[in-house]
Amino acid sequence: MSGETDLGVLLGSMTASLVEGVFVFATLKDRQVPDGLTARMIFQEDEGTTLILMQTEADRFDLGYDFPCRMITLNIHSALEAVGFIARIATELAKEGMGVNPVAGFYHDHLFVPLGREQDALNVISDLAVTCAQD
């Protein structure tokens, strides 16, 4: 189950789903994740622990946060070693003046896009898929 590596197949076959809710990025300096906190992602960095979590969850635990955003899941099983997939999508989003924070899971890639720009991002992804499917 290594996933797809062919860039043309990945781009031309992808669809995208908007995940419900507003997400935020937070950090914990002491590396101690509070008991009961549910995060979408926890990543240990030298400077502290990065969390991606629902804004409501950050508020519940009184955590400071940045980058209120929406999560888009790319509905294709991309291989972890696939080359250029996220770069191509990020390039297209950049052309629309939009930054993106991608996260690779084992089965799917997930894009965190600025709150309020989620429909723009979905349109870019859809247009890219249509264009690549025709190539």
Image (spheres, helix red, strand yellow):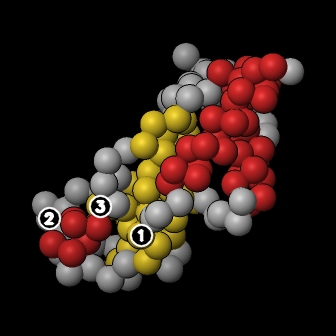
* Amino acid tagged 2: Asp
Q: Is residue 60 visible?
A: yes
Percent position (x, y) of residue 91? 77, 53
Image x and y of residue 51, in percent:
38, 65
Pick whichever, 16 or 101, lies toward us.
Answer: 16
Q: Relative to residue 2, is residue 123 depicted above or below?
A: below
Dot 1 alpha-carbon crowd within 10 angstroms: few under 14, some 14 to 19, many 20 or more: some
At label 2, counting other C-alpha atoms closer than 10 Å, the crowd grade (few under 14, some 14-19, many 20 or more) is few
Between discs 3 and 1, the one toward the N terminus = 3
Nearer the observer, 97 or 99: 97
Classify the position of the N terminus by image quarter.
Answer: top right
Residue 66 pos. (x, y %): 43, 77
Q: Nearer the viewer, residue 72 or 124?
A: 124
Q: Earlier in the sequence, mark 3 or mark 2?
A: 2
Q: Is residue 36 left or right of residue 3?
A: left
- Given the current orientation, which residue lies at the most extreme right position? 135
Q: Upstream in the sequence, badge 2 or badge 1?
A: 2
Q: What residue does disc 3 label?
A: 54
Badge 3: few (under 14), some or many (20 or more) residues near its Cα, within 10 Å?
A: many
Q: Nearer the viewer, mark 3 or mark 1?
A: 1
In the rendering, at what x and y percent does residue 79 appear?
64, 28
- Check residue 68 in the rendering and tell me which mark sits there, or answer none: 1
> For mark 2, what is the residue?
35
